[in-house]
Image (spheres, rainbow, N blue to C red):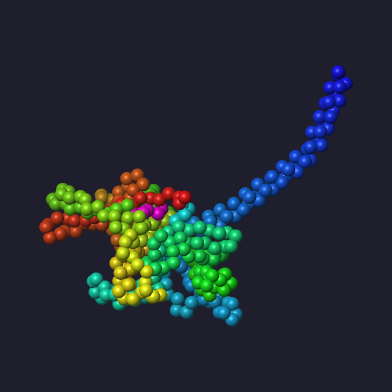
Amino acid sequence: MRNERSVRTVLTVAAVAASIPILLGVRAVVDRATLLEAAQESTSMSDRTKFVGTYRLITTEIKDTNSGEWSETPNFNRIGYITYADTGHMGVHIMPRSRLPFSSDPPTGAEVQVALQGYTAYFGSFTVDDQQQFVEHQRLGHINQGGIVDVKRFYDFEGDRLILTPAPADGGGKSTATSRLVWERLPNAPLSAEEKKFVGFHRLLYTDRYREKDGEQIFHGQRNEERAGTSYIIYTPTGHMMVHLMHKEGRTKYAGVRATPDEALKAFQTYGGYFGRFTTYENYEPRFVMHNQQGSLRPARDVDATKRFYQFTGNVLRLGGPPRLNEAGEMAGGHLYWEKQGPIN
Protein backbone atom coordinates (compact mmCIF):
# COMPACT_ATOMS: atom_id res chain seq x y z
CA MET A 1 0.00 0.00 0.00
CA ARG A 2 2.81 2.36 0.93
CA ASN A 3 4.56 1.73 -2.42
CA GLU A 4 1.28 2.27 -4.28
CA ARG A 5 0.70 5.63 -2.52
CA SER A 6 4.30 6.58 -3.25
CA VAL A 7 3.81 5.83 -6.92
CA ARG A 8 0.62 7.91 -6.99
CA THR A 9 2.43 10.77 -5.23
CA VAL A 10 5.28 10.66 -7.70
CA LEU A 11 2.86 10.64 -10.63
CA THR A 12 0.89 13.58 -9.17
CA VAL A 13 4.05 15.62 -8.59
CA ALA A 14 5.20 14.82 -12.10
CA ALA A 15 1.87 15.90 -13.55
CA VAL A 16 1.92 19.16 -11.61
CA ALA A 17 5.53 19.76 -12.62
CA ALA A 18 4.65 19.12 -16.25
CA SER A 19 1.77 21.58 -16.11
CA ILE A 20 3.86 24.41 -14.65
CA PRO A 21 5.26 25.61 -18.00
CA ILE A 22 1.77 25.49 -19.51
CA LEU A 23 0.28 27.44 -16.60
CA LEU A 24 3.13 29.91 -16.70
CA GLY A 25 2.61 30.31 -20.42
CA VAL A 26 -1.11 30.95 -19.95
CA ARG A 27 -0.34 33.35 -17.08
CA ALA A 28 2.21 35.15 -19.25
CA VAL A 29 -0.36 35.53 -22.06
CA VAL A 30 -2.95 36.81 -19.59
CA ASP A 31 -0.44 39.18 -18.02
CA ARG A 32 0.62 40.49 -21.43
CA ALA A 33 -3.02 41.04 -22.42
CA THR A 34 -3.74 42.75 -19.10
CA LEU A 35 -0.67 44.94 -19.40
CA LEU A 36 -1.53 45.83 -22.99
CA GLU A 37 -5.09 46.71 -22.00
CA ALA A 38 -3.84 48.76 -19.06
CA ALA A 39 -1.30 50.53 -21.28
CA GLN A 40 -3.97 51.39 -23.84
CA GLU A 41 -6.28 52.63 -21.11
CA SER A 42 -3.43 54.61 -19.56
CA THR A 43 -2.58 56.21 -22.90
CA SER A 44 -6.21 57.12 -23.52
CA MET A 45 -6.63 58.51 -20.04
CA SER A 46 -3.32 60.31 -20.35
CA ASP A 47 -4.38 62.13 -23.53
CA ARG A 48 -7.76 63.06 -22.07
CA THR A 49 -6.11 64.16 -18.85
CA LYS A 50 -3.68 66.34 -20.79
CA PHE A 51 -6.58 68.41 -22.07
CA VAL A 52 -7.90 69.32 -18.63
CA GLY A 53 -7.08 72.97 -18.03
CA THR A 54 -7.59 76.48 -19.37
CA TYR A 55 -5.69 77.87 -22.34
CA ARG A 56 -5.37 81.30 -23.92
CA LEU A 57 -5.18 81.81 -27.64
CA ILE A 58 -1.63 82.65 -28.76
CA THR A 59 -2.13 82.80 -32.50
CA THR A 60 -3.82 81.24 -35.48
CA GLU A 61 -1.85 79.83 -38.40
CA ILE A 62 -2.39 79.03 -42.05
CA LYS A 63 -0.52 76.52 -44.21
CA ASP A 64 1.19 77.23 -47.48
CA THR A 65 -0.31 74.65 -49.81
CA ASN A 66 2.89 74.52 -51.88
CA SER A 67 5.56 74.21 -49.19
CA GLY A 68 3.38 72.76 -46.44
CA GLU A 69 4.86 75.30 -43.99
CA TRP A 70 2.75 76.94 -41.30
CA SER A 71 2.85 80.69 -40.62
CA GLU A 72 0.91 83.13 -38.46
CA THR A 73 -2.33 84.42 -39.92
CA PRO A 74 -1.69 87.92 -41.33
CA ASN A 75 -2.85 90.74 -39.03
CA PHE A 76 -3.69 88.33 -36.21
CA ASN A 77 -5.46 90.34 -33.50
CA ARG A 78 -7.72 88.12 -31.40
CA ILE A 79 -8.18 87.18 -27.78
CA GLY A 80 -9.73 84.00 -26.50
CA TYR A 81 -9.84 81.20 -23.95
CA ILE A 82 -10.77 77.55 -24.13
CA THR A 83 -11.28 75.38 -21.07
CA TYR A 84 -11.64 71.63 -20.56
CA ALA A 85 -12.82 70.15 -17.25
CA ASP A 86 -12.21 66.71 -15.77
CA THR A 87 -16.02 66.35 -15.72
CA GLY A 88 -16.02 66.17 -19.53
CA HIS A 89 -17.33 69.72 -20.08
CA MET A 90 -15.72 72.37 -22.27
CA GLY A 91 -16.31 75.98 -23.31
CA VAL A 92 -14.70 78.60 -25.53
CA HIS A 93 -14.83 82.32 -26.37
CA ILE A 94 -12.72 83.93 -29.13
CA MET A 95 -13.07 87.60 -29.99
CA PRO A 96 -11.43 90.07 -32.39
CA ARG A 97 -9.68 92.75 -30.31
CA SER A 98 -10.79 95.67 -32.47
CA ARG A 99 -14.58 95.94 -32.47
CA LEU A 100 -16.75 99.02 -32.82
CA PRO A 101 -19.14 99.65 -29.90
CA PHE A 102 -22.82 99.82 -30.73
CA SER A 103 -24.02 103.33 -31.51
CA SER A 104 -27.59 102.59 -30.45
CA ASP A 105 -29.38 100.68 -27.71
CA PRO A 106 -30.82 98.34 -28.76
CA PRO A 107 -28.35 97.88 -31.63
CA THR A 108 -29.40 97.59 -35.24
CA GLY A 109 -29.15 94.33 -37.15
CA ALA A 110 -26.35 95.77 -39.27
CA GLU A 111 -24.33 96.64 -36.14
CA VAL A 112 -24.79 93.17 -34.70
CA GLN A 113 -23.87 91.55 -38.01
CA VAL A 114 -20.51 93.35 -37.86
CA ALA A 115 -20.04 92.60 -34.13
CA LEU A 116 -20.48 88.86 -34.65
CA GLN A 117 -17.92 88.61 -37.44
CA GLY A 118 -14.98 86.60 -36.14
CA TYR A 119 -16.61 85.98 -32.74
CA THR A 120 -16.73 82.33 -31.62
CA ALA A 121 -18.64 81.21 -28.54
CA TYR A 122 -19.87 77.73 -27.67
CA PHE A 123 -20.00 75.16 -24.89
CA GLY A 124 -20.77 71.50 -24.36
CA SER A 125 -18.79 68.29 -23.79
CA PHE A 126 -15.66 66.74 -25.27
CA THR A 127 -14.26 63.31 -26.04
CA VAL A 128 -10.72 62.34 -27.03
CA ASP A 129 -9.67 59.73 -29.61
CA ASP A 130 -6.03 59.06 -28.77
CA GLN A 131 -5.62 56.58 -31.63
CA GLN A 132 -6.48 59.07 -34.37
CA GLN A 133 -5.31 62.04 -32.31
CA PHE A 134 -8.42 64.19 -32.38
CA VAL A 135 -10.77 65.77 -29.87
CA GLU A 136 -14.45 66.17 -30.62
CA HIS A 137 -16.42 69.08 -29.20
CA GLN A 138 -20.07 68.12 -28.76
CA ARG A 139 -21.67 71.56 -28.73
CA LEU A 140 -24.73 72.03 -26.58
CA GLY A 141 -24.90 75.72 -27.41
CA HIS A 142 -23.37 77.95 -30.07
CA ILE A 143 -23.68 81.62 -31.03
CA ASN A 144 -24.11 80.46 -34.64
CA GLN A 145 -27.68 79.20 -34.56
CA GLY A 146 -27.17 76.87 -37.50
CA GLY A 147 -23.63 75.76 -36.71
CA ILE A 148 -22.59 72.11 -36.90
CA VAL A 149 -23.22 70.45 -33.54
CA ASP A 150 -20.17 68.16 -33.28
CA VAL A 151 -16.81 69.47 -34.51
CA LYS A 152 -13.53 67.57 -34.79
CA ARG A 153 -10.12 69.02 -33.99
CA PHE A 154 -6.84 67.18 -34.55
CA TYR A 155 -4.48 67.93 -31.69
CA ASP A 156 -0.80 68.17 -30.82
CA PHE A 157 0.79 68.96 -27.47
CA GLU A 158 4.09 70.82 -27.57
CA GLY A 159 5.17 71.64 -24.04
CA ASP A 160 2.58 74.04 -22.61
CA ARG A 161 1.05 74.57 -26.03
CA LEU A 162 -2.02 72.85 -27.46
CA ILE A 163 -2.40 73.03 -31.23
CA LEU A 164 -5.91 72.39 -32.50
CA THR A 165 -6.36 71.79 -36.22
CA PRO A 166 -9.99 71.87 -37.45
CA ALA A 167 -10.81 68.86 -39.58
CA PRO A 168 -11.44 69.87 -43.23
CA ALA A 169 -15.10 70.27 -44.14
CA ASP A 170 -14.73 67.70 -46.94
CA GLY A 171 -13.85 64.99 -44.42
CA GLY A 172 -10.14 65.00 -45.20
CA GLY A 173 -7.44 64.23 -42.67
CA LYS A 174 -5.04 66.40 -40.76
CA SER A 175 -2.56 66.52 -43.64
CA THR A 176 -5.05 68.36 -45.84
CA ALA A 177 -6.04 70.96 -43.21
CA THR A 178 -5.01 74.55 -43.95
CA SER A 179 -5.65 76.35 -40.64
CA ARG A 180 -4.99 75.77 -36.96
CA LEU A 181 -5.17 77.48 -33.56
CA VAL A 182 -2.30 77.63 -31.10
CA TRP A 183 -3.21 77.75 -27.41
CA GLU A 184 -1.03 78.11 -24.31
CA ARG A 185 -1.88 76.38 -21.04
CA LEU A 186 -2.35 78.77 -18.13
CA PRO A 187 -1.07 77.98 -14.62
CA ASN A 188 -3.54 77.53 -11.79
CA ALA A 189 -4.04 80.66 -9.72
CA PRO A 190 -3.57 80.89 -5.92
CA LEU A 191 -7.31 80.91 -5.27
CA SER A 192 -8.75 81.47 -1.82
CA ALA A 193 -10.86 78.75 -0.19
CA GLU A 194 -13.96 80.78 -1.09
CA GLU A 195 -12.91 81.17 -4.73
CA LYS A 196 -12.33 77.43 -4.99
CA LYS A 197 -16.04 76.90 -4.20
CA PHE A 198 -16.86 78.55 -7.53
CA VAL A 199 -14.61 76.36 -9.69
CA GLY A 200 -16.57 74.16 -12.06
CA PHE A 201 -19.28 74.18 -14.71
CA HIS A 202 -22.66 75.45 -13.46
CA ARG A 203 -25.90 75.01 -15.42
CA LEU A 204 -28.71 77.52 -15.12
CA LEU A 205 -31.79 76.23 -13.29
CA TYR A 206 -33.98 79.36 -13.45
CA THR A 207 -34.09 83.09 -12.79
CA ASP A 208 -36.45 85.08 -10.59
CA ARG A 209 -37.25 88.67 -9.59
CA TYR A 210 -37.61 90.52 -6.29
CA ARG A 211 -38.57 93.98 -4.97
CA GLU A 212 -37.69 95.64 -1.69
CA LYS A 213 -38.83 98.81 0.05
CA ASP A 214 -37.46 100.35 3.23
CA GLY A 215 -35.19 97.34 3.62
CA GLU A 216 -38.07 94.86 3.53
CA GLN A 217 -38.76 92.38 0.75
CA ILE A 218 -42.22 92.96 -0.67
CA PHE A 219 -42.08 90.56 -3.64
CA HIS A 220 -40.08 87.49 -4.64
CA GLY A 221 -41.11 85.30 -7.56
CA GLN A 222 -41.67 85.50 -11.32
CA ARG A 223 -39.70 82.32 -11.98
CA ASN A 224 -38.39 82.11 -15.55
CA GLU A 225 -36.90 79.04 -17.25
CA GLU A 226 -36.53 80.26 -20.85
CA ARG A 227 -32.73 79.86 -20.63
CA ALA A 228 -32.67 76.98 -18.13
CA GLY A 229 -30.60 73.95 -19.07
CA THR A 230 -29.02 75.67 -22.08
CA SER A 231 -26.97 78.26 -20.20
CA TYR A 232 -23.70 77.80 -18.31
CA ILE A 233 -21.35 79.83 -16.17
CA ILE A 234 -17.81 78.50 -15.86
CA TYR A 235 -15.15 79.22 -13.24
CA THR A 236 -11.68 77.71 -13.65
CA PRO A 237 -8.74 76.94 -11.34
CA THR A 238 -6.73 79.52 -13.29
CA GLY A 239 -8.98 82.30 -11.98
CA HIS A 240 -10.87 82.74 -15.25
CA MET A 241 -14.57 82.61 -15.95
CA MET A 242 -16.94 82.66 -18.90
CA VAL A 243 -20.69 82.92 -19.36
CA HIS A 244 -22.94 81.39 -22.01
CA LEU A 245 -26.61 82.40 -21.78
CA MET A 246 -28.76 80.81 -24.48
CA HIS A 247 -32.51 80.67 -24.96
CA LYS A 248 -34.05 77.24 -25.38
CA GLU A 249 -36.48 78.42 -28.06
CA GLY A 250 -36.45 80.80 -31.01
CA ARG A 251 -33.07 79.83 -32.49
CA THR A 252 -33.20 78.88 -36.16
CA LYS A 253 -30.56 78.07 -38.74
CA TYR A 254 -29.27 80.87 -40.98
CA ALA A 255 -30.57 80.75 -44.54
CA GLY A 256 -27.04 81.14 -45.89
CA VAL A 257 -23.48 80.67 -44.68
CA ARG A 258 -23.43 84.14 -43.14
CA ALA A 259 -26.18 85.68 -41.05
CA THR A 260 -28.22 88.50 -42.54
CA PRO A 261 -28.68 91.62 -40.34
CA ASP A 262 -32.05 90.31 -39.15
CA GLU A 263 -30.66 86.84 -38.45
CA ALA A 264 -27.66 88.30 -36.62
CA LEU A 265 -29.94 90.42 -34.44
CA LYS A 266 -32.06 87.38 -33.58
CA ALA A 267 -28.96 85.37 -32.67
CA PHE A 268 -27.71 88.22 -30.47
CA GLN A 269 -31.06 88.51 -28.71
CA THR A 270 -31.09 84.80 -27.84
CA TYR A 271 -27.43 84.32 -26.88
CA GLY A 272 -25.35 86.35 -24.46
CA GLY A 273 -21.93 85.85 -23.02
CA TYR A 274 -18.64 87.24 -21.82
CA PHE A 275 -15.30 86.08 -20.43
CA GLY A 276 -12.47 87.28 -18.18
CA ARG A 277 -11.24 86.78 -14.62
CA PHE A 278 -13.05 86.56 -11.29
CA THR A 279 -12.35 87.64 -7.70
CA THR A 280 -14.45 87.06 -4.58
CA TYR A 281 -15.05 89.53 -1.77
CA GLU A 282 -16.28 87.20 0.93
CA ASN A 283 -15.44 89.54 3.81
CA TYR A 284 -18.06 92.06 2.68
CA GLU A 285 -21.71 91.99 3.62
CA PRO A 286 -23.38 90.96 1.44
CA ARG A 287 -20.61 88.91 -0.18
CA PHE A 288 -19.98 89.44 -3.87
CA VAL A 289 -17.87 88.21 -6.78
CA MET A 290 -16.44 90.47 -9.48
CA HIS A 291 -16.48 89.32 -13.09
CA ASN A 292 -13.70 91.32 -14.73
CA GLN A 293 -14.62 91.07 -18.38
CA GLN A 294 -11.93 90.94 -21.04
CA GLY A 295 -14.43 90.38 -23.80
CA SER A 296 -18.14 90.16 -24.49
CA LEU A 297 -20.56 89.50 -27.30
CA ARG A 298 -21.61 93.12 -26.81
CA PRO A 299 -18.75 95.32 -27.99
CA ALA A 300 -17.60 97.82 -25.37
CA ARG A 301 -15.07 100.64 -25.27
CA ASP A 302 -13.65 99.59 -21.91
CA VAL A 303 -13.31 96.41 -19.89
CA ASP A 304 -16.46 95.92 -17.84
CA ALA A 305 -16.31 94.78 -14.21
CA THR A 306 -19.60 93.12 -13.28
CA LYS A 307 -20.57 92.83 -9.61
CA ARG A 308 -22.63 89.82 -8.52
CA PHE A 309 -23.84 89.13 -4.99
CA TYR A 310 -23.70 85.42 -4.30
CA GLN A 311 -24.92 82.68 -2.02
CA PHE A 312 -24.20 78.93 -1.97
CA THR A 313 -26.87 76.42 -1.00
CA GLY A 314 -25.43 72.96 -1.47
CA ASN A 315 -24.53 72.62 -5.17
CA VAL A 316 -26.62 75.64 -6.13
CA LEU A 317 -24.99 79.04 -6.63
CA ARG A 318 -27.27 82.08 -6.56
CA LEU A 319 -26.00 85.19 -8.33
CA GLY A 320 -27.65 88.59 -8.41
CA GLY A 321 -26.66 92.04 -9.57
CA PRO A 322 -27.11 95.20 -7.47
CA PRO A 323 -30.82 96.17 -7.34
CA ARG A 324 -32.04 99.36 -9.01
CA LEU A 325 -34.61 101.94 -8.00
CA ASN A 326 -37.82 101.63 -10.03
CA GLU A 327 -40.58 104.18 -10.68
CA ALA A 328 -42.50 103.01 -7.61
CA GLY A 329 -39.60 103.86 -5.32
CA GLU A 330 -38.75 100.19 -4.84
CA MET A 331 -35.37 98.49 -5.15
CA ALA A 332 -35.83 95.85 -7.85
CA GLY A 333 -33.48 93.09 -8.87
CA GLY A 334 -33.18 89.48 -9.91
CA HIS A 335 -31.32 86.25 -9.24
CA LEU A 336 -29.88 83.49 -11.38
CA TYR A 337 -29.70 80.01 -9.84
CA TRP A 338 -26.90 77.78 -11.11
CA GLU A 339 -26.27 74.11 -10.30
CA LYS A 340 -22.70 72.77 -10.27
CA GLN A 341 -22.33 69.84 -12.69
CA GLY A 342 -20.74 66.49 -11.94
CA PRO A 343 -19.01 64.17 -14.42
CA ILE A 344 -20.82 63.55 -17.72
CA ASN A 345 -21.93 59.92 -17.98
Q: Position of residue 22 (x, y in %)?
A: 77, 41
Q: Residue lying farthest left? A: 328
Decide if residue 109 is in sight here: yes
Q: Residue at x 24, y 74 (%)?
A: 104
Q: In the figure, 274 relative to 1: above or below?
A: below
Q: Position of residue 275 (x, y in %)?
A: 37, 63
Total marks in image: 0
Q: Position of residue 152 (x, y in %)?
A: 50, 65
Q: Position of residue 335 (x, y in %)?
A: 26, 54
> Is residue 23 covered in magenta?
no
Q: Residue at x 12, y 57 (%)?
A: 329
Q: Residue at x 56, y 71 (%)?
A: 172
Q: In the figure, 257 relative to 339: above or below?
A: below
Q: Residue lying farthest right? A: 3
**Nearest to the observer: residue 235 or residue 169:** 169
Q: Which picture quadrant has residue 9?
A: top right
Decide if residue 189 is in sight here: no
Q: Which picture quadrant has residue 332?
A: bottom left
Q: Point out the stretch of residues depicted in magenta.
A: 200-204
Q: Main secondary structure of the magenta part?
A: strand
Q: Residue lying farthest bottom? A: 66
Q: Residue at x 34, y 61 (%)?
A: 246
300 left or right, relative to 53: left
* Quadrant housing the N terminus: top right
**Nearest to the observer: residue 45 or residue 323:** 45
